Amino acid sequence: MNSLSSGRLARVLDNLHRGAEAADRDYMSEVKADIEASGTTLEQVIAEKLAEERADYRTIYRDRADNFLAVSRAYGCFLYSIARACKATRIVEFGTSMGISTIYLAAALRDNGGGRLIGTELEPTKVARARANLDTAGLADLVDIREGDALDTLQDVGGDVQLLLIDGAFALYLPVLKLVEPRLKPGAVVLGENAFDPGYLDYVRNPANGYLSQPLPVDEGRGNEFTVRTA
Ligand SMILES: C[S@@+](CC[C@H](N)C(=O)[O-])C[C@H]1O[C@@H](n2cnc3c(N)ncnc32)[C@H](O)[C@@H]1O
């Protein structure tokens, strides 16, 4: 059973990926042009972005309320596969946006026989759009999207988590991981999409912290970290 290839889900995802491309085209071009014009390296640009987010991530993401900033189709299929492979029944997602990654993960829960996905999103308009998209996909019954700051909304995730997707404000990867950590048992998988924060990477790559971690070669190796809880 692979509901990703069912007509309904395939159509919903196709529409959403096309919508994401159209909505984010100008923003992505601006980012590329800024990097080229600044004459700096991608590492420097990321370090600046991290510093800006540390100062005020709420304003930054409020300004991006109309942007999807979504995972690629390839990464979405990877999310589905991992959630199936670890037979996830409880998934936590930091950074729901319009719900594209959520749909891939919730489809895996459905095909695993059921479960719960706890998602969280700062922007109220995105929460409404994500809920509507999950409804259209026929997956709303599996998902609890919590509106607000992950640092508050993920305080209680209700049970052990087999898969954690971290895809929100770059500066919060480590605090969010530490928040959910007590619910991650050996074998749980943590995926950092856009995991650029050196503090986060140092933490998950240090076996003394109870993780085994490595970069993933998807999407041209662009900041994707694959981590397994070992302790
Ligand atoms: C990269 S996008 C997520 C994309 C989504 N996972 C997908 O693939 O469709 C990051 C999202 O995280 C949200 N976000 C940023 N900081 C947050 C926080 N502290 N709490 C909850 N959501 C946050 C942003 O508003 C934004 O929509």
Image: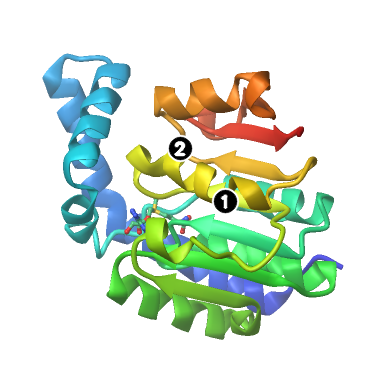
Going by the numbered disc 1, the residue's amino acid type is Val
Q: Which colour scheme is used?
A: rainbow
* The quarter of the displayed image where residue 116 is located: bottom right
Left or right, 40 with reference to 42: left
Q: Is residue 72 above or below residue 195?
A: below
Residue density around tag 1, few if under 14, some if 14–19, many if 20 or more, within 10 Å: some
Q: Where does the N terminus fall, quadrant-wise? A: bottom right
Ligand 1's image quarter is bottom left
Residue hosting label 2? 174
Q: Can residue 5 be seen in this view?
A: no
Left or right, 123 with reference to 4: left
In percent of width and height, residue 209 lies at 63, 26
Going by the numbered disc 2, the residue's amino acid type is Leu
State the count of labels.
Answer: 2
Q: Which residue is drawn at 24% across and 33% down?
A: 49
State the residue in front, 151 or 118: 151
Badge 2 element: helix
* The quarter of the displayed image where residue 48 is located: top left
In percent of width and height, residue 40 lies at 20, 15
Residue density around tag 2, few if under 14, some if 14–19, many if 20 or more, within 10 Å: some
Q: Which residue is drawn at 23% across and 40% down?
A: 53
- Residue found at the far left of this picture: 37
Badge 1 element: helix
Q: In this view, does 141 lie above or below 152?
A: below
In percent of width and height, residue 195 lies at 46, 33
Left or right, 214 with reference to 168: right
State the residue in front, 176 or 104: 176
What separation in Å lies between label 2 and label 1 (alpha carbons)? 10 Å
Q: Is residue 105 above or below residue 198?
A: below
Q: Which residue is drawn at 65% across and 78% down?
A: 142
Q: Do the residues labelled 2 and 1 touch (CB within 8 Å)?
A: no
Residue hosting label 1? 180
